[in-house]
Image (cartoon, rainbow, N blue to C red):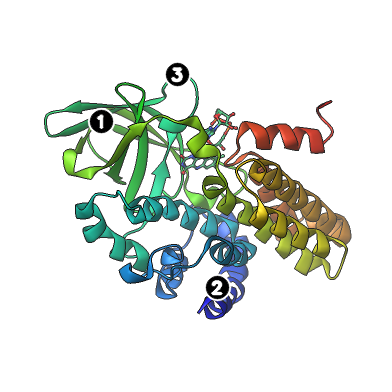
Amino acid sequence: MTANVLTEARRIAEQVLFPAAMATDRADAVPALHFDALAAAGLYGIFGPAEAGGLGLDRPAGCAVVEELASGCLATTFILIQHFGLLRALSADDAPARLRDAWLGPACRGELRAGIALAGLLPGPPRLRARPVSGGWILGGTCPWVTGWGRVHVLLVAARGPGDTIVTLVLDAADQAGLTVTRQHLTAVNASATVQLDFADVLVPADRLVSRVPADPAMNLTAAALRVNGSLALGLAGRCCRLLGASPLDDELDTCRQRLDAAGDETIQAARAAASELAVRAAAALAVHEGSRSITAAAHAQRLTREATFLLVFGSRPGIRAELLHRLGASAG
Ligand SMILES: Cc1cc2nc3c(=O)[nH]c(=O)nc-3n(C[C@H](O)[C@H](O)[C@H](O)COP(=O)(O)OP(=O)(O)OC[C@H]3O[C@@H](n4cnc5c(N)ncnc54)[C@H](O)[C@@H]3O)c2cc1C
């Protein structure tokens, strides 16, 4: 099963995503047919339980699929992996049965597609708040980065609730009263249709509550939370390696993957930084290898160098940032 899934992911990456990567880079939004191809292959459900129609892959196997897809098109894969937030929330043992029964199957099949808006998890003063009212929850504040607008149906929203809690809700990803949507204009993966969402008393019905738990900053620093994003960097580095031909970077890629797969909560941030740094170096090496034509508009090398820069800052955490600054020679530590 796992080998077949990987083969199918590779086929989609090579035959659907990579041939369109330069056009997608210039587009306002990733073509919808990319997501239909992923859904048809069951790839929305790679981490979903088999009994709900998911593929039930373990983390290394699922991450290998993500890496393949990212080697084909980073923007497409970037949107896809946001979906795994809802999948994970609905698959949890304590997920509300009502939501799980209604949505886990469609989410595994890619009929229901999700993004995430996790501003409530950011440390410091709350940027996104949820307060209970009769019939539901009221959201107020800002979520500066929400990827996939127009390509997802719902958002998994994490907001700060009363009493230092994290309230997780499912919101329709659509224009609605109190919600202001502002497009972020990006120099890489712009087709990810990333937006800022401003919430002015947006009502979410009570039956959309997924969980309410005490805020715990450590929850977002685990290997379980941080591993998948590392496969975006591996995929990008892998594409550079393929375009370069055999080089010592191939062994470095294998080492980075092994390190990410073996990482626990204490070591995942350093492993993520190593993968991001490799992506930057591999993209730079590709540009040098290809010479002047690498900075022409049609060249993969210039796209990949911009995308590698994006991967230095997306999904970051304090430990990833510190390790990257150290690796890049910008800190004494
Ligand atoms: C193009 C793009 C698209 C993005 N799409 C989304 C999206 O769809 N949904 C979404 O929720 N976020 C999204 N993000 C935000 C992203 O996940 C991180 O929050 C962000 O990359 C960290 O940025 P920062 O280093 O500027 O720190 P800030 O966002 O300013 O955060 C402040 C500090 O909090 C840390 N931090 C960030 N996130 C967490 C967390 N979850 N738990 C604990 N600490 C944290 C950071 O490392 C930093 O030290 C996106 C970011 C980018 C650049």
Q: Which residue in the structure is indicated by mark 3? A: 125
Mark 2 lies on residue: 9
Q: Give the residue furthest to the left.
A: 134
Q: Is residue 143 visible?
A: no
Total numbered badges shown on the rendered structure = 3
Label 3 beta carbon within 8 A of ligand 1:
no
For label 2, the SS is helix
Q: In front: mark 3 or mark 1? A: 3
193 versus 58 height, above or below: above
Q: What residue appears at the point 41 percent right and 29 percent down from the top-left corner? A: 215
> 28 or 279, which lies in front?
279
How far, Cα to Cα, is label 3 from label 2?
41 Å
- Of the numbered discs 3 and 2, the one sitting upstream in the chain is 2
**Amino acid identity at mark 1:** Gly
Q: Which one is in front in this view, the residue at disc 2 or the one at disc 1?
A: 2
The amino acid marked with disc number 2 is Ala
Image quadrant for the C terminus? Answer: top right
